[in-house]
Amino acid sequence: MITKKIVLFLLLIGFQLSAQDKKWTLEECVDYAIKNNISVQQSELDLKNASINKKDAVGAFLPNINGNASHSWNIGLNQNITTGLLENQTTQFTSAGLNVGVDIYNGLRNQLQLRKSNLQIIASQYQLTKMQEDIALNVANAYLQILFNKENLKVQLQQKQYNLQQLERTKELVEAGVVPNGDLLDIKATVASDTQRVIAAQNALLISKLSLAQLLRLEDFENFDIDENQIPALNSEILLQSSQDIMQKAKETRTELKIAQSNVELAEKDVAIARGAYQPTISGFYSFSTRAAYSDRVVGIQPDADNPTSVIGYVDGTGQSVLQPNFSPILGKPEPVFDQFSNNKGQNFGLQISIPIFNGFATRNNVQRSKVALERAKLNFGQQELDIERTVFTAYTDANSAKESYEAAETTLEARKLSFEYAKARYEVGLINVFDFNQAQTLYVNAQSDVLRTKYDYIFRTKILEFYFGIPLIKKQ
């Protein structure tokens, strides 16, 4: 039993360590963000709602069927439907019916509404895709920012380590009388400045991790980290394409234009639906009804013992009364309910046509409003085309500029490195003072930072350009 507890404890410890050591790849970050982002989830609900609207459009082709039933009690002075006399009584009635109505023709509005619902589903799918693409770009940008801060922190730590070594070297030079004691104080100040830069780099890294963790909606952001070995490739063939080719490809693939085009098609369907109200409508109807009563019924007659005869006239001349026998009804129990339902059933069916003549310009105004909405959708589509052209051209220019900046930063770094090594050699033999040495070192560190900054800016700019060319941001393995 103790052995099992120890094994379970070790497994739990191992699980916690593996969870803390998890390194998120860019693909995992994007997938997780898309699944958990609130805006994406709202777009998915819009897509579900569009599917429900399509079911409504399909249902408009089906007949409307409604059943009804009622049971009533009538208490008080009422005419007895059996004897015809007014009596204080309680009567009961049951009735039931079924009504069916179906649209035969209504200006093709049902067909147009179904086509519109199909377009709404497509538009909602495009909107969902657009939201996912935006989230992917934001995650990629945040991911690259963490990579930059990680490498920048490494540079600052390496520089601090080097200056600590230089501090020990300067102590030896001061003891040997090669450099003055003031140089030692300057090196100590440089090491203190390095510590500040390390702290700033650590804070920047922590904030960038926090930003991405919040974008992913992770609660345990303190242990969140990414796979720094998965650095995107620098070389991209996208810059071999012309800006016009990329722009044309973007017009064919970009979701924004597809959404705008869908909105134009939806507006066209709205105009057609509004015009359908000018046409007459034809509908068919059918109804079935039956009823039952719970009053006693007449099952026969018998002589009236209390009033056997009644005078109905007199014989001319003699004045003799003409009598007729009086009968009273023999009452029996009500007829069985189901027999009454069968005997009292009735049906009603027919066609109904409604011709619009004048409705206060309501139909005309609806058509005009739909036309205005259509023109607005067309203008929005044209604006989206202009925005795509401007965005692609800007992205193309930014990517080329980022590439040139990165290449220039690498050239500068190589030169600063040689200059720093030369200054270091001269400082160690006392040919330059510590101020000149620190200047060369500062320029070298700044050149390293510039290379990192331009490197990740170049990566992100090329990713955006590939994105507009239709290349997926994340290439599935």
Image (cartoon, grey):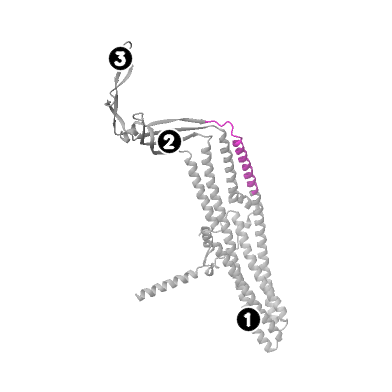
Label 3 neighbourhood size at 10 Å, few (<14), some (14-19), many (20+)?
few
Q: For residue 360, what is the image quadrant?
A: top right
> Is 475 or 408 nearer to us in this picture?
475
Q: Is disc 2 placed on a helix, strand or loop?
A: strand
Q: Residue 138: x and y, percent?
A: 59, 60
Nearer the observer: mark 2 or 3; the answer is 3
Q: For residue 465, what is the image quadrant?
A: bottom right
Label 1 sits on residue: 164
Q: Amino acid at mark 2?
A: Asn
Which SS type dominates the magenta stretch? Answer: helix
Q: Label for residue 99? A: 2
Q: In terms of sequence position, does the residue under pointer 1 or pointer 2 come before the other?
A: 2
Q: Label for residue 377? A: none
Q: Is disc 1 placed on a helix, strand or loop?
A: helix
Q: Is disc 3 placed on a helix, strand or loop?
A: loop
Q: Report the Cα–Cα distance between label 1 and label 2.
A: 94 Å
- Going by the image, does 468 lie left or right of 101? right
Q: Residue 61: x and y, percent?
A: 47, 38
Q: In terms of sequence position, does the residue under pointer 2 or pointer 3 come before the other?
A: 2
Label 3 sits on residue: 320
Point out the stretch of residues depicted in magenta: 354-383
Q: Report the Cα–Cα distance between label 2 and label 3.
A: 61 Å
Is residue 346 shown above or below 423?
A: above
The verdict on residue 98 being magenta is: no
The verdict on residue 357 being magenta is: yes
Is residue 242 visible to the viewer in this orientation of the structure?
Answer: no
Point out the image quarter for the N terminus: bottom left
Q: Residue 454: x and y, percent?
A: 65, 65
Q: Residue, x 54% and y 30% (percent of image)? A: 355
